[in-house]
């Protein structure tokens, strides 16, 4: 069966993945679309003072995800990075899963759980493995005039394990609220944070424009989702500006 074959492929990649970590800004939904294959691209670049070492820091991520069960989505992710004054290079492969914990729309919010594992590409001083996990929440509470609101919140925790693993446990909260004007135009605001003991916290906030629409009216299959945002650093430890974008194509089988 198609879903069983995809699950087996994901488990194989999970067993052999051996790449390094690349961080990117993403807000995840807890809702699993059973039987849907998704192709996603994320990108971001930073802006700061010249010669600060924090300008033009680029990160890109490409993902393939599939809803193998009504409550489980698995995916493979590849990452590329270009730190300031360095060329773009392949940086990481990860395997991830989203578990939907509650039926969509049954309660005031939908709840889920996310988990991801990455292994280092280079041995040297890098940790043997990094785990990211935490809860996901989505709700459509509230209205502004005639338009509804969509809220998403993530609280992800990172932990390293193996040789040279550090004792740090970064916590990365993220939140997004958007106004559901129509499928093609959903303006909103979003926030990304990072809190780690012994280091200055990092906070970004800014406007986002999103869209989420089906291609059926155009005689095509699938759905297209987009996001584009400009985030402002709220303290000295954070880059002054970050442009972030997300493109997704999903098709049900």
Image (tube, grey):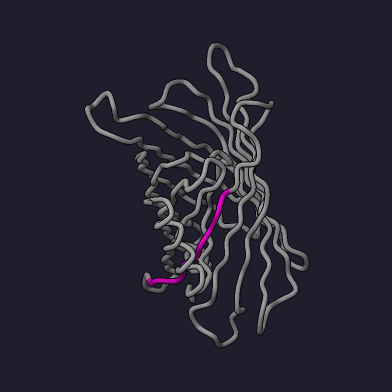
Image-based side of 140 in relation to 219, left or right? right
* Residue 246 visible to the viewer: yes
> What residue lies at 51% left-to-right and 66% top-to-bottom?
22
- The spot of residue 114 in percent (x, y) is 61, 52
Report the quarter where the C terminus lies.
top left
* Residue 235 visible to the viewer: no
The main secondary structure of the magenta stretch is strand
Which residue is at the front of the view, 195 or 213? 213
Which residue is at the front of the view, 239 or 210? 210
> What residue lies at 50% left-to-right and 68% top-to-bottom?
14
Residue 217 falls in image quadrant: top left
- The spot of residue 201 in percent (x, y) is 71, 58
- The spot of residue 166 in percent (x, y) is 71, 76
Q: Residue furthest right?
A: 197
Q: Is residue 120 above or below residue 54?
A: below
Image-based side of 223 in relation to 124, left or right? left
Q: Is residue 161 magenta?
A: no
- The spot of residue 173 in percent (x, y) is 67, 49
Residue 197 falls in image quadrant: bottom right
Residue 172 falls in image quadrant: bottom right
> What residue lies at 65% left-to-right and 39% top-to-bottom?
137
Number of marks in picture: 0
Q: Residue furthest bottom?
A: 124
Give, as a single range, the part of the protein colored magenta. Answer: 89-98
Q: Is residue 177 above or below residue 134?
A: above
Q: Is residue 111 above or below residue 161?
A: above
Which residue is at the front of the view, 253 or 147? 253
């Amino acid at each position: 069966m198609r879903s069983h074959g995809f699950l087996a492929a994901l488990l194989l990649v999970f067993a052999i993945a051996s790449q390094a970590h690349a961080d990117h800004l993403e807000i995840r939904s807890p809702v699993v679309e059973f039987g849907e294959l998704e192709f996603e691209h994320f990108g971001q670049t930073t802006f700061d003072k010249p010669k600060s070492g924090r300008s033009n820091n680029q990160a890109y991520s490409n993902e393939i995800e599939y809803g193998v069960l009504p409550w489980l989505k698995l995916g493979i992710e590849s990452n590329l990075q270009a730190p300031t004054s360095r060329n773009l290079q392949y940086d990481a492969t990860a395997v991830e899963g989203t578990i939907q914990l509650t039926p969509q729309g049954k309660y005031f919010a939908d709840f889920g759980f996310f988990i991801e594992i990455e292994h280092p590409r280079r041995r040297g001083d890098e940790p043997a493995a990094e785990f990211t996990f935490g809860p996901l929440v989505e709700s459509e509470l509230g209205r502004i005039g005639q338009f509804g609101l969509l809220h998403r919140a993530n609280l992800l925790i990172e932990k390293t394990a193996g040789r040279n693993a550090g004792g740090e446990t970064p916590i990365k909260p993220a939140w997004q609220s958007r106004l559901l004007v129509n499928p093609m135009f959903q303006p909103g605001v979003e926030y990304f944070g990072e809190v780690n003991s012994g280091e200055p916290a990092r906070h970004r906030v800014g406007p986002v424009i999103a869209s989420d629409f089906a291609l059926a009216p155009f005689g095509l299959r699938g759905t297209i989702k987009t996001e584009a945002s400009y985030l402002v650093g709220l303290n000295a430890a954070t880059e002054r500006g970050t442009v972030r974008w997300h493109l997704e194509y999903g098709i049900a089988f």
